[in-house]
Amino acid sequence: GNSVTQMEGPVTLSEEAFLTINCTYTATGYPSLFWYVQYPGEGLQLLLKATKADDKGSNKGFEATYRKETTSFHLEKGSVQVSDSAVYFCALSAGAAGNKLTFGGGTRVLVKP
Amino acid sequence: GAVVSQHPSWVICKSGTSVKIECRSLDFQATTMFWYRQFPKQSLMLMATSNEGSKATYEQGVEKDKFLINHASLTLSTLTVTSAHPEDSSFYICSAVGPGRYNEQFFGPGTRLTVL
């Protein structure tokens, strides 16, 4: 079946530090990959996505590249802000599952001033 | 665009009562909606897929008689937690997929249910 594994948090950083959150997946077929962000007290928001190998999704300074050879979709940001404090979820949608999303466990990020 | 709302945002109820949660797509028609459950500091667990005009498809281990889902129109799906118990306390989140937005789900803000 499909599965997503992402690094456990919490990840605590200082402002302007570099952020990486690792995400690897197992899926049948050719999945689409997503990163969602959940700010405190809010619902999930799509941060970025990639639908095929070597695609790079980007938004708000965040980037992730779809690496089929390593089945990975690591999230990166070069300089984080306090406002980036949130929980980040890696997810995939694949094959026979149609639009169903399979989520990773989430990574809580705390950025300190 | 692509806004999904949920109502109520939070609800407290007594054990044994039923609670209805609404999920609405405000500016698009959603042929498919999903219901998730999220425990504190954990990931989202898909409960069921709700298709307009047909019965919901439940994930393995989810009691369909306890979590009643109705997708009566292209903009509204409801989740009713019947005979709620404290272990049903959780954060319930819906999402909606519209025509032409393949693989993209838009999420509601969630409903926090507390059963006393």
Image (tube, rainbow, N blue to C red):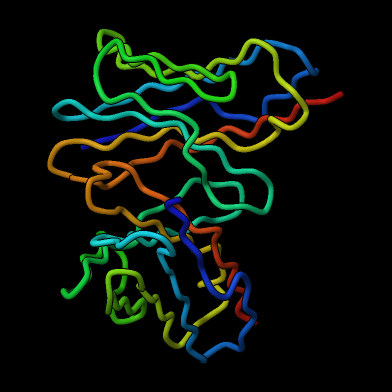
Number of marks? 0
Q: Is residue B98 left or right of residue B106?
A: left
Q: Residue at x 25, y 8 (%)?
A: A69
Q: What residue lies at 25% left-to-right and 65% top-to-bottom?
A: B58
Going 21% across and 65% down the picture, which residue do you hit? B57
In this picture, residue A11 sits left or right of residue B75: right
| Position in image of residue B20 (x %, y %) | 46, 82
Question: Among all residues in the image, which is located at the extreme bottom?
Answer: B17
Residue B89 locus on image (x, y percent): 56, 70
Quadrant into which the C terminus of chain A falls: top right
Where the N terminus of chain A falls, by quadrant?
A: top left
x, y percent for residue B114:
62, 74
| Residue under the point 65% across and 37% down | A86
> Can you tell which quarter of the image residue A52 is in?
top left
Q: Is B17 above or below relative to A104?
A: below
Q: Using the rendered view, name the quadrant where residue A39 is placed.
A: top right
To which quarter of the image does residue B102 belong?
top left
Work out whether B6 lies above or below A37: below
Give left or right: position of B30 versus A63.
Answer: left
Identify which residue, A88 or B8, lies in the foreground: B8
Locate residue B88, reporting x and y percent: 51, 72
Judge whether B40 appears above or below A67 on screen: below
